[in-house]
Structures are given as C-alpha cells and as structure tokens.
Amino acid sequence: MFPNLAAFLRQHTPVAEEWPIWTNGESENAVGSLLLQERTYLSSQLPPDEVVSSVRAILFRGNEVMVITDHQGDAYVVPGGRRERGESLTAALQRELLEETGWHVADTAVLGFIHFHHLSPKPDGYLYPYPDFVQVVYTAVAKSYEATAISPDPYVTSTRFCSVQKVLTLNLSAGQTALLQAAITQRATRS
C-alpha cells in the first residue's frame, strides 16, 4: 500500500466492506477477472491524489436520484468514471457525469471515497494505481440535460431519475446504501 494512503486511511473508519469481482463482462471465471477488497468511507477529506483513479457522484434532481442500470441488470447510484491524465477531480466529475448521464451538474460536494485493494496479481498492461486505488464520491445537482453528450457505454443500459423513496428500496450494495443515506442527510442539512 502507498505509505501516504495508509496514513490517510488510519484517520478514517469504513462504513461498509465488500469483496467484489470485476470481470471483463463475461463471467466471474473469465480471464481478466479481478478480486478486490472494497471499503467505503464517509469524509469530506480528499485522499492522496496519486491514488485517485476515478470520480463518482450521487446525482440529485429535486427529490430524485439518478439510477443507472448496468449490462447485467443491476442498479447503482454512483455514476462516474476514470480521470484523464492531468484532469482535476471536479473536471473529471463534470465530464464523466455528462458522458454517462447527459447531465451538466453543479453544487458538487465531497461525500466520501471508496478504497479498493487488489487481491489478485497485477494484470499485464494494468495502467492504474496498484495494489490500491480510490474513487472519490461527491454529491451533485443536475442542472441541464444534453442528450448528444452521452457516450455509448456497453456496461450502461439505462439512466433515469427515481424518487428517493423508490431508490431506497433498490437492492444496492452496502457501500452505495451508506453513501446514498449520507447524501440524503447532507442535502437535508444544507436546506
């Protein structure tokens, strides 16, 4: 683990822990599968920049939350994606949300982060921090829609806003549930 990341993580307590398997889109036994340890944290502090590979957000529109359905039919509430070289976190967030959902966003605020630790050997040609990387999670507000900005993504089958009450009934991971509940609380205290 990167020493500065280890020091940063010692200052925080995870709210969820999971062990996902990321695949190349075929099956859990597919060549290229990655076994990971995933810990979700709530914090307004940013982790060390050199380990942040992606940005994500709980995206609100009034009393609705953006829900993405992936190619396997699973719902998630943290759209976003990878940073480009030299890109700031907020620029990456705005670009990724626009490309994935078609929405320009405003009123972003750091909500927490997700720390991933690889439990599998480093894949050949792997371009991201290893054995640890972090995704920073924000809250954001949808401002205007631009359908032509959406980049086709084979892993995303639909995007839609749903009422907060409906989203709370979805079968989300423990980490996403904790982030969603914290985002709802954060918005209520700002109002």
Image: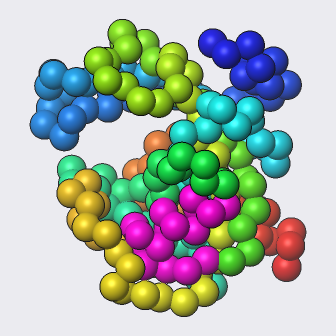
How many marks do you count on the picture? 0
52 vs 98: above or below: above
Judging depth in this view, the residue of 77 and 45 nearest the camera is 45
Where in the figure is residue 57, as x and y percent of width and height?
58, 60
Q: Residue at x 85, y 79 (%)?
A: 191
Q: Is residue 134 above or below residue 143?
A: above
Residue at figure coordinates x 49%, y 57% from the top left: 80
- Relative horizontal placement of residue 19, taking residue 155 as reference (left or right): right
- Could one spot residue 115 in this view of the protein? yes
- Magenta stretch mostly in which secondary structure? helix
The residue nearer to you, when weighing 117 against 188, is: 117
* Residue at the image position 21 percent from the left and 57 percent from the top: 154
Q: Which residues are magenta?
A: 90-105
Give the image quarter of residue 35: top left
Rendering quarter of residue 33: top left
Residue 1 place in picture, x, y as percent: 63, 12
**Which residue is depicted at the point 74% across and 13% down?**
3
Image spot of residue 16 (x, y percent): 61, 33
Determine whether, in the image, residue 43 is placed left or right of residue 138: right
Q: Is residue 30 magenta?
A: no
Q: Does 56 sit above or below residue 54?
A: below
Question: In the rendering, at what x and y percent does residue 169 appear?
Answer: 46, 61
Task: Identify which residue, 18 or 44, lies in the foreground.
Answer: 44
Residue 122 drawn above or below residue 80: above
